[in-house]
Image (cartoon, rainbow, N blue to C red):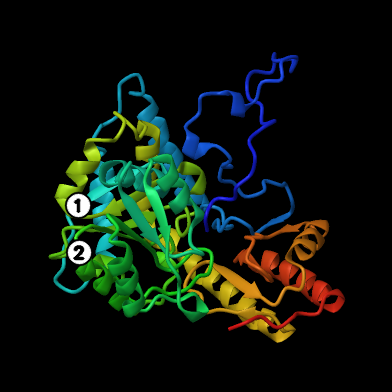
Amino acid sequence: MTPRTVRTAGLRTGSAAYDGSVAFTLDDLPIRDDLRGQSPYGAPQKHVRVQLNVNENTHPVPADVAEDIVSSIRQALTTVNRYPDREFTELRRSLADYLQRDLAPGQALGPEQIWAANGSNEVLQQLLQAFGGPGRTVLGFPPTYSMHSILASGTGTTWIPAQRDDEFRIAPETVVAAIREHQPDIVFLCGPNNPTGTPLPIETIEAAYAATHGIVMVDEAYAEFMPADAPSALTLLPGRERLVVSRTMSKAFAFAGARVGYMAAHPAVIDAIRLVRLPYHLSALTQAAAVAALRHAPAMLAMVDDITRQRDRMVKELRAMGYRTYETWSNFVLFGGVADPHAAFEALLEQDVIVRDLGIPNHLRVSAGTEEETTVFLDAMRRIAADQPPVRVAA
């Protein structure tokens, strides 16, 4: 979704010693004109018992895995007086090995095709710094991950929104028509899409690549939650030097707090990213933690099966209550038919549950939690449905 526009007047920053005696606001600063009136990204941060609003993995890291990660960090601390490996060699090798599971038979991926950063947001920011910027454009398909347009704005890249098809889908002919109309320098696709969970057909990615001479980026933050037989965009990398596939360890790996995102692309794209990255941008402690977590990939991914079970349970039971649900290949569910999303959001908060109100009329989004968390949420929604019966939403 596009960033929400609000006035910045009255937003004060500074140290705790600032007494507020001078009426000086952000609007008084010589900020870039294109940033005036914008608001920063951020879901509400409220401390409640059941937090299902930001698509985290609500399952904790298994104890034995956590112990190995802590041991690796402890070892890294012995040389933390030195700068970290600027090329994060071991981490790139580990990520390349991990991604083999999603490649086509006979396909290989080397560490020279991998890049990592502090969350996939930094990966995408670096991509826009290298291939976007003033005078260049990036095409996206809202509603989609809101940071796509915010990162475009932050790098001076013009964001061009295009229409989706019914059910929030994007057909090959739809993406081709948008590319021909706007001639973007970069195309951002999100599959599965956030905030809708919608699958992204592999044919749509192929069509987008064939229709442009620019960069095509596929955000696969939720790839591990896709059906096992669904092909990843990684399978399209051979012969497509301008294709980039972004991933994260935040979701399936329960590593949101560690901030590790990465991408796979042609080595020439990786070389371009080196031109804009900050030196030593991945700390030695982050690298050590991520490598250790990847050593335990099977144990970490075992959580995915339980999460998808709870996701599918939410779909089934919300539908039985009268809400409209959509096909989702992610770890969350977008559901429509909510008579008053804000009132439902507040009613859930009163029951110690937080979900996400995205501003999509008559819709809310909920992340799949543990079995207990899912039960609490569904019981709360039944009470809300009794007070505010679901309404019909357009197809």
Task: Please determine whether, in this image, residue 128 is positioned above or below residue 141.
Answer: above
Type of residue at label 2?
A: Leu
Type of residue at label 1?
A: Gln
- CA separation in Å, label 2 and label 1: 10 Å
- Residue 211 figure quarter: bottom left
Q: Nearer the viewer, mark 2 or mark 1?
A: 2
Tell me residue 301's x, y (percent).
Answer: 43, 63
Q: Nearer the viewer, residue 62 or 92?
A: 92
Report the residue at 33% width, 52% height from top.
137
- Residue 288 figure quarter: top left
Q: Secondary structure at mark 2?
A: loop
Report the residue at 45% width, 78% height from top.
165
Tell me residue 121's x, y (percent).
Answer: 42, 47
Task: Please determine whether, in this image, residue 29 is positioned above or below residue 136.
Answer: above
Report the residue at 44% width, 44% height from top.
153
Q: Which residue is mark 2?
A: 237
Is residue 46 at least partly visible in the picture? yes
- Residue 218 figure quarter: bottom left
Tell me residue 134's x, y (percent).
Answer: 33, 41
Report the residue at 58% width, 40% height from top.
37
Q: Which residue is mark 1?
A: 113
In the displayed structure image, the side of residue 255 where residue 110 appears, left or right: left
Label 1 neighbour load within 10 Å: few <14, some 14-19, many 20+: many
